[in-house]
Amino acid sequence: MIDNFKTKRISMLQQLLINDSEQTIMINGDDKSNPLLLFLHGGPGTPQIGYARKYQSELEKHFTVVNWDQRGAGLSYSNEIPGSSMTLDQLTADTIHLTERLCKQFNRQKIYIAGYSWGSVLALHVLQERPDLYDGYIGISQVVNIQKEETEAYRLLTDWSEERKHRLLQKTLRFIGAPPWNSQLQRSLFLLCIEMKGGGFTHNPIGALKAGGRMLFGEPYGVRGSFLAARGQMFSLKHLWEDLIFFDAGQSVSSIEIPCCFMSGRFDLTVPGTISYEYYQKVEAPYKEWHWFENSAHSPHLEEPDRFAEVVSRFASFHL
């Protein structure tokens, strides 16, 4: 993909050296003069370059969208990356570095930043350090405190399984036990329970299968890129999990200096929206708004992409 500078449209895949690590970004939009939106993917280590464009055609009418495979993830994975560099502080520095490069490349003073799930943790750290680089923040499935979110999800799943007399789910939840958990097996089984309930990556399981198929069989990932993504996810989780599990936005990020737009899927059990909504109510910001996505679980930007584009574009035009 290349950028034709004679047209307003932009579509390009770039490899950049960011703080001594080669990383990949994808830039797409109908008009290069539109606001820039940097998207921080989930995980840790779960990139979305492989399927993002299938869901952001409406968004590209309003923004020049930058998808980025973070250090150690997706096309930015390499077995030469030292594990010692895989820290939240380093990814924060990477994000700021990339933002400054985008501002220079597109001759902007500021851009928008969106954080999805793990990316919302990263975004809050970035905004504590350099709020001056951003016009506004979009928090998608905002992580607040993983331990509280797992406890709430376990309670909701237990109540639902008892009401519906779902024997398999009841037995699995009893086997796992209530959080906190000491083993990844317990957490993996719980994530499987969440998917069974329709509260995982997408409310409709077909949505998750489609995204995976588009990554595996489409450009720019394909089989090789998908293999890299799988290795990168394991690598990222190994080194960044503690940063995620001990994060508490309520304690460490009581205020955000720029306008904020938060959203959650009504069916999300990965990061229950009730916890995110409590944080939205308490956090101080010059302007903030909240949106429920009634037909979504953990990925409203993929499950309801047209509404997502409408909400974000209205937010971007309203507060300026």
Image (cartoon, grey):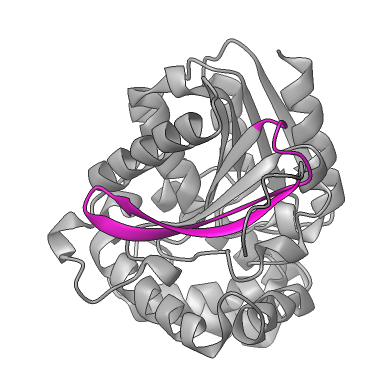
Quadrant where the N terminus is found in the figure: bottom right
Residue 25, compared with residue 38, is above or below; it is below
Q: Quick check: can you spot residue 124?
A: no
Q: Nearer the viewer, residue 178 or 279?
A: 279
At a point 42% along the width and 51% down the height, the residue shown is 146
**Chief secondary structure of the magenta span?**
strand
Quadrant where the C terminus is found in the figure: top right
Q: Quick check: can you spot residue 120?
A: yes
Q: Within the magenta stretch, is there residue 66?
A: no
* Percent coordinates x, y for residue 249 in the rendering: 41, 34
Q: Seen in the image, is 73 located left or right of residue 285?
A: left
Q: Residue furthest front?
A: 6
The span picked out in magenta is 9-35
Q: Seen in the image, is 317 located left or right of residue 298?
A: right
Residue 311, compared with residue 260, is above or below; it is below
Q: Within the magenta stretch, is there residue 31?
A: yes
At a point 84% along the width and 56% down the height, the residue shown is 295
At a point 37% along the width and 23% down the height, the residue shown is 130
Residue 307, compared with residue 302, is above or below; it is above
At a point 67% along the width and 57% down the height, the residue shown is 299
* Percent coordinates x, y for residue 161 in the rendering: 69, 72
Q: Nearer the viewer, residue 219 or 6?
A: 6
* Percent coordinates x, y for residue 108 in the rendering: 55, 24
Q: Residue furthest top?
A: 286
Q: Nearer the viewer, residue 184 or 71?
A: 71
Residue 132, compared with residue 28, is above or below; it is above
Label count reads: 0
* Percent coordinates x, y for residue 184 in the rendering: 34, 76
